[in-house]
Amino acid sequence: MINILFCDDNTEFLSLLHGYVKKIMKSHFRDILMDAELFSYDNGKSVISFAKKSRVDVIFLDIDMKNLNGFEVAKRLIEINDETLIVFVSAYDQFVYDVFEFYPVAFLRKGKICDELPKVLKRISEKLNESSEKLTVCTTQGKVLLREKDIVFIHSIGNYCYYMLINGIQHSCRDTLSNIEKSIMSLKFYRVHAAYIVNFDQIQSIDKPNSVIMGRNNVPVPIAQRRWTGFKKAYAEYISRSLI
């Protein structure tokens, strides 16, 4: 079951958005969102109360709200479940520059909802699919299936490579980073150094041009100078694919 929430203190727009999403889901995204439950709230406090009791998979979140604004709500949701997919909704384009720290799925403009909503739902569908995408890794303990989104980075030391996961677990395999780089087809992974491949999904910040800060534990990973330009371009393209 997928829980999709809507939060906007403008109840008229809230009802409108809820209806549009429900209509598009039924006609275009039955395969992924067929079991989705939709919930609407006109304040952030109710959303946070819901999140404490039930999983929030997706939320369409207005930014400019009374009491708790959208950024404050997003921060609490991420603390509760950092896998929640956030779509910020606003009538003000300038907010787009403030949303990046929350890694939203999209920024939806109220004035262009009819044009942009189908693309936003397509992106959500893709993201939900990604949660099931896995890599088969031949570790020193045997074959394991790892979710792509759980891999923070891959580190090469000598004749071994180490898959560092978001939960702190690591898996080792006897292989070269070059072989692993060739085998990973996902566009979210990038080799930033002779000894490191990083997952764009797990980047917390960039200490340019020397390192990238990775995962919940804020591990610094070096960026080779000769790879800096290519990394910047690939990461910018990744971000552009993530936002509408």
Image (tube, rainbow, N blue to C red):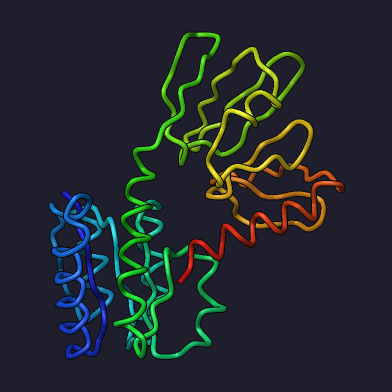
Q: Is residue 206 left or right of residue 244?
A: right
Q: Which one is in front, 158 or 123?
A: 123
Q: Residue at x 66, y 37 (%)?
A: 197
Tally of numbered discs: 0
Q: For the view shown, which residue lies furthest in the right direction?
A: 225
Query: How far across and how far down the image is residue 132, in percent?
Result: 34, 38
Query: Where does the C terminus fall, quadrant-wise?
Result: bottom left
Q: Is residue 41 left or right of residue 132?
A: left
Picture quarter containing residue 145?
Answer: top left
Picture quarter containing residue 108?
Answer: bottom left
Query: How far across and how far down the image is residue 122, in percent?
Result: 33, 61
Q: Residue at x 56, y 46 (%)?
A: 187
Q: Residue at x 63, y 31 (%)?
A: 154
223 to 38, vertically: above or below: above
Q: Is residue 93 left or right of residue 217?
A: left
Q: For the view shown, which residue lies furthest in the top direction?
A: 141
156 to 219, vertically: above or below: above
Q: Residue at x 38, y 51 (%)?
A: 83
Query: How far across and how far down the image is residue 121, in percent?
Result: 30, 65
Q: Which one is in front, 11 or 237?
A: 237
Query: How far across and how far down the image is residue 193, in percent?
Result: 77, 38
121 to 67, vertically: above or below: above
Q: Which one is in front, 120 or 50?
A: 120
Q: Is residue 116 left or right of residue 47?
A: right
Q: For the view shown, which residue lies furthest in the front direction?
A: 27
